[in-house]
Image (cartoon, grey):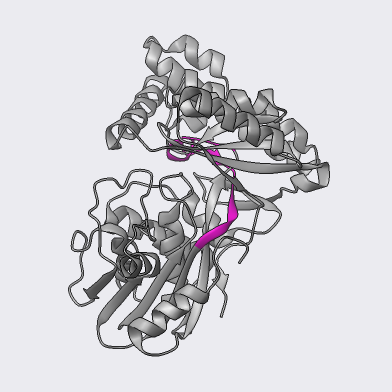
Amino acid sequence: MAGVIGAGRVVATFRECFGADPGGVWHAPGRANLIGEHTDYNEGFVLPFALDRGTLAAAALTGDGTLELRDAAMLEAQASGTRASGTRASGTRASGTGASGARVSVPLDGLAPGQVTGWAAYPAGVAWVLREAGYPVTGASLAIDSDLPQGAGLSSSAALECAAALALTQLQGIDVPRAELAALARRAENDFVGVPSGIMDQSASLLGQAGHALLLDCRSGAVTPVPLDPASAGLALLIIDTRARHALTDSGYAARHRECEAAARALGVRSLRDVDDADEAVSRLADPVLRRRARHVITENHRVLQAVDLMRAGQFGGVGKLLSASHASLADDFEISWPEADTTVAAAVGAGALGARMMGGGFGGSVIALVPEDAAPVRAAVGAAFDRQGWPAPAFLDAPPSDGAHRLI
């Protein structure tokens, strides 16, 4: 694992909590979305890739009808008297869940949505959905650890689900196709946790390939690897965590969803995916808000496909302009950016980034930037811009496109 943590702490936590070695350790990465924002629920295209950071699950079968869950970071913080975020998956729109403790026991018989809250709801939801699908889950012990920053929009929830899903199936010798496992993990998040996410996060976590992004058609479900090797062009991808957390809750996301549906109805199509000409669509929409929402989705789908063409041709530098165009569309037409993101994009591009954009649901989280291999000037410029505004310093994460979920031990 190339992230901050290795398997040592999660294995030690498992041994301390359960008095034995785990049957294995699994790693599932978080994801970044290169381009394609708010296109997923419009049946459009997205282009995510797996990160080198993620969630670890050390696990063993018990057969006692209980899912025993332990959070390594929270337990370590309790022992030292400090505070830690642990592996609690925030999710872009999961603010309504409660906060589980470091030790959670979940009886599997009679398990149903709404019975578990907080971070533990994600692995519990995976156990529930596997049983609903006919896969045996008769009891297991899991210790969880993560090096994904919470609330940064890097999909810690999907990483937690996918690590648990691999552990619970592979411990029993069950080979579930990755695409099916991604769909099951998504159902756990949608139906058990109650977060209305799409399939992008779980697909990136389970199907990611080093040196590639995934072109995901959110209508057909087709996933196509696309070469993503910025280093070959002397470039790199940098994630900048603005440390601004989502200020708008479910209502903002739901409002954008409703507006896109209303625009599609007004245009007489199933979804905005079915519209190719943004100017023609805008001319037919009387409501100025619907015009802006439709224009973003239609042009964003085009930008995703243009990015794929450039990447296949090895012209990675050209993707930068598409990132900046995406940010402008998200800020102006979709109206979901936030001051720290706008400042980050401007400072990064001014210091030599080829392009940058906000990433995720909006109103907080991270920016992704295509930067020269020596990103020090970009980091310095963004840090200085934040300092001038009196904001907490941003965090910087290198983002090499990495392999998807796998067994470590």
Is residue 64 part of the magenta span, yes or no? no
Left or right: residue 134 compared with residue 55: left
Q: Does residue 325 appear in the picture of this structure?
A: no
User: Residue, x 36% and y 89% (percent of image)?
Assistant: 19
Which residue corresponds to the image point at 52% horizontal and 38% vertical from the top-left? 394
Q: Position of residue 68 (x, y in %)?
A: 29, 77
- Choose between 13 and 173: the one closer to the eye: 13
* Image location of residue 347, percent across then percent down: 61, 25
Q: Give the residue drawn at x 59%, y 54%.
A: 51
Quadrant in which the N terminus appears:
bottom right
Residues rendered magenta in the picture: 35-54
Q: Quadrant of the C terminus?
A: bottom right
* Residue 407 appears anywhere in the view: yes
Residue lying at 55% horizontally and 46% vertically, measured from the top left: 32
In terms of depth relative to the viewer, which is nearer, 280 or 329? 329
- Residue 134 to residue 162: above or below: below
